[in-house]
Amino acid sequence: MLVVLVPGVLTYYLKKLHPNSIKLLLSFSGGFLLSIAFIHFVPELYMNNSERVGLFILLGFLLQVILEFLSKGIEHGHTHVKANTSAFLVMMVGLSIHALIEGIPLAGEYHGHEHAHDHSGSFTIFTGIMIHKLPVAISLTTLMLGSNLGLKGILTNLLIFAIMAPIGLLIGKFLHAEELLSSNVLDYIFAVVIGMFLHISTTIIFESSEGHKFNLYKFLSILLGFGIAILLH
């Protein structure tokens, strides 16, 4: 929650960050998300439960496409959308659904089977979500600064966005504890989240190019994301 609220409040008081700062943060988070998806999550899911995993990864990819019709791409730094009341409400719905779903695997039980005692994967997705939420919180606040929302309205929306992933975690814990979700089903939910990560990360990386040429700092930011993800393996 703090990784949303703190940068959001700082952005409000600073009023405006240089656009390149957000782009570099996004490039880093895109590289990190892409790396942890391929290095950590996809191999682990196929090892534990290969049946239909690819289908659910594809479903997550397509789900993120749909969600971005609502959120207008703010997950990868789009802040040029006119934030009237109805458009902003739709945007918050898209962001909230995304955050809620990605929080469910934080329950830590998606490993299932013989890996149930290992929480390293849960830590990695936790890190990935935090790193990605930082530039999204900045982008969201920047967008709200251009609207008629005051500090109270900005804090309210930031808080709503901040609590969605923890709510997803609690939902996952509750449903698993009540045996309403099996480990296999949680694996499939995690596969959906991986698909969402893949869409966001590849979009960020492709949008980080200018005229099909990478800016050196953006390229280094992506490489840094790759490197940290590899070290976490």
Image (spheres, helix red, strand yellow):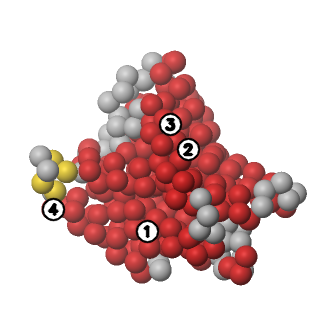
Q: What element carries label 1?
A: helix
Label 2–label 3 contact, CB within 8 A: yes
Q: What residue is pinned by disc 2?
A: 98
Mark 3: few/some/many CA within 10 Å (<14, 14-19, 20+): many
- Gap in Å between the C-alphas at discs 2 and 3? 7 Å
Q: Residue furthest front?
A: 51
What percent of the width, then of the height, locates residue 142?
A: 39, 36
- Gap in Å between the C-alphas at discs 2 and 1? 20 Å
What percent of the width, then of the height, locates residue 41?
A: 52, 68
> Is residue 14 in sight in this rendering?
no
| Circle on res. 38 | 1
Please report the residue visible at 35 percent of the width from the left and 67 percent of the height from the top: 225
Q: What element carries label 4?
A: helix
Q: Is mark 2 on a helix, strand or loop?
A: helix
Residues 200 and 21: in front is 200
| Amino acid of disc 1 | Phe
- Gap in Å between the C-alphas at discs 3 and 1? 22 Å
- Gap in Å between the C-alphas at discs 4 and 1? 24 Å
| Amino acid of disc 4 | Leu
| Amino acid of disc 3 | Leu
Please report the residue visible at 61 percent of the width from the left and 64 percent of the height from the top: 51
| Amino acid of disc 2 | His
Residues 143 and 51: in front is 51
| Circle on res. 216 | 4
Sequence-wise, the earlier of marks 2 and 3 is 3
Q: What residue is pinned by disc 3?
A: 67
What percent of the width, then of the height, locates residue 12?
A: 43, 39
Please report the residue visible at 59 percent of the width from the left and 40 percent of the height from the top: 97
Instruction: Between label 2 and label 1, give the one nearer the viewer.
Output: 1
Instruction: Between label 3 and label 4, give the one nearer the viewer.
Output: 3
